[in-house]
Image: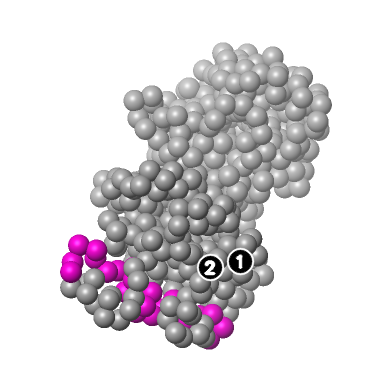
Amino acid sequence: MRALISVSDKQHVVTLAQALTALNIELVSTGNTQRLLTEHGLSVRSVSDLTGFPEMLDGRVKTLHPAIHGAILARRDLDTHLQQLTEHAIAPIDIVVVNLYPFAQTIARPDVLLQQALEQIDIGGVALVRAAAKNFPAVLPLVNPADYAEVIAALETGAVPMQLRQRLAARAFAHTAAYDAAIATYLHDAADVFPATLTLGWEQAQILRYGENPHQRGALYGTFFDYFEHLHGKELSYTNVLDISAAQGLIEDFPAVATGAGTTLAILKHTNPCGVGTAATLAEAWHKALATDPLSPFGGVIVLNAPCDLELAQAIDAIFSEIILAPDFAAEAFDLLQKKKNRRLIRVRQPITQQGRLLVQSVPGGVLVQEADAAPLEEEHCKVVTERAPTDDEIRALRFAWRVVKHVKSNAIVYATTDRTLGIGAGQMSRVDSSRLAVWKAQQAGLSLQGSVVASDALFPFADGVEAAIEAGATAIIQPGGSLRDEEVIAAANRAGAAMLFTGRRHFWH
């Protein structure tokens, strides 16, 4: 038997080559891989020995030759194929151990140049992998170091099961597909947000215990853990991943510099905010957020825009939370919080809000794709439409409420002050019902809505929604506007002496 080994990721490759040698399998290799194996005392033939042709064009051409591809692609069950190998003095290659140039890692560098990226587009390696995978009944394609041990164990028994061979072939084709997808994504015209063909190539990051419910299987794909580091607690579930994404998206709308009021903390349940507070300290922000809804946070998610300190850790330790998400944890805070084994502690590695990021939602037969709703509230988008303009405090409160309502499931209503939420109504079929729910939640929490402001993620279609908000105690309102009955809505606000801003932009979240 003969194995061709040419890898970019050299993890465990020496151990693999030693095991193959022990099984009397001849080794063939190229370039740096051959040098590495030789340095470890292994006997390795060069590809040039087989082809009779040297590597050329700075290594761009080395394995693209009939002596290599004929040795891989020949069907062992066809006498004509074997006869042609004999005629041309070609010995079969039975194992192909290849993984590709690090294209994705190269383009991830912020300073990468186009020519540097192009040099990391593998040609020969992709051809080798696809050739071996096509002929998997006779040739073992190995693209992932994680599979080496299983293959060695099978070879030591004397026969590799067809089921394993087919699985390795599937992984090989997935490997090249993901590689091509990364290249296509990098090279497509940046102005073409939605390419004619959408190529998705995410590697499996983790098999989840189950999906949203125990009877559903689930898995996580992609680079989620480039953004979040799981420091402590049980493995993440499907819903944990959704909650973390929603929580971080919300808190990134509350950078300390933008709010100008210290640190912000939010509590979420089932991706909806239960309460949000901003204060000079995280502990104060926690008490403000908790006061909005003291019951729902049990088993929820806590997210902060500053490192978790001991004072906050002591405050939140009394309530069980599934997840605490922060830029970092002070040593004393971490020591305290990690005493509960079921509490997941997550460190944020980098922001998730990026210009150009696309959101993908599966639908029967395909996917929906849209840009992320990353647009911040900018004052130039706001227009005073009532006789009375909002006061400075009302403007601060309206901006706070607008940041929150964007992250509440539609229909969404948020009552707030300058630094805290008071009542949140989410996901109701009627906007008035969302407002009533927010009012009821505030009443249950013992919070007064007198002098509050209200934010609506989408337009008020009728005056009744504004009238209900004013009756509850709101003095100022922020909403997108755009209803056929805007004049009636504005008139209702004017009759009550309330101020109202139109943003011209809605924030539906389904």
- Can the viewer see residue 388? no
The dot on residue 38 is 1
**For residue 89: magenta?**
no
Viewer-proximal residue, 78 or 263?
78
| Secondary structure found at label 1 | helix
Q: Image quadrant for the N terminus?
A: bottom left
In the picture, measured across the screen, residue 328 lies left or right of residue 214, that is: right
Vertical relation: 403 (above or below) 317: below
Disc 2 marks which amino acid?
A: Val
Part of the protein shown in magenta? 57-79
| Residue kind at label 1, given as amino acid type | Thr
Nearest the eye: 358 or 112? 112
Measured as percent of width and height from the top left, residue 374 is found at 55, 51
Q: CA distance from mark 2 to mark 1?
A: 7 Å
In terms of secondary structure, what is the magenta stretch mainly? loop
Q: Is residue 483 above or below residue 178?
A: above
Q: Where is 42 relative to 348, above or below?
A: below
Position of residue 180 in the picture relative to residue 83 (left or right):
right
Label whose residue precedes the other's in the sequence (2 or 1): 1
Q: Position of residue 318 (x, y in %)?
A: 69, 14
Answer whether residue 295 is visible to the viewer in this image. yes
Percent coordinates x, y for residue 360 in the rendering: 41, 50
Q: Secondary structure at mark 2?
A: strand
Q: Are marks 2 and 1 in contact (CB under 8 Å)?
A: yes
Q: Is residue 16 left or right of residue 261?
A: left
x%, y% of residue 53?
A: 46, 86
| Residue 58 drawn in magenta | yes
* Residue tagged 2: 44
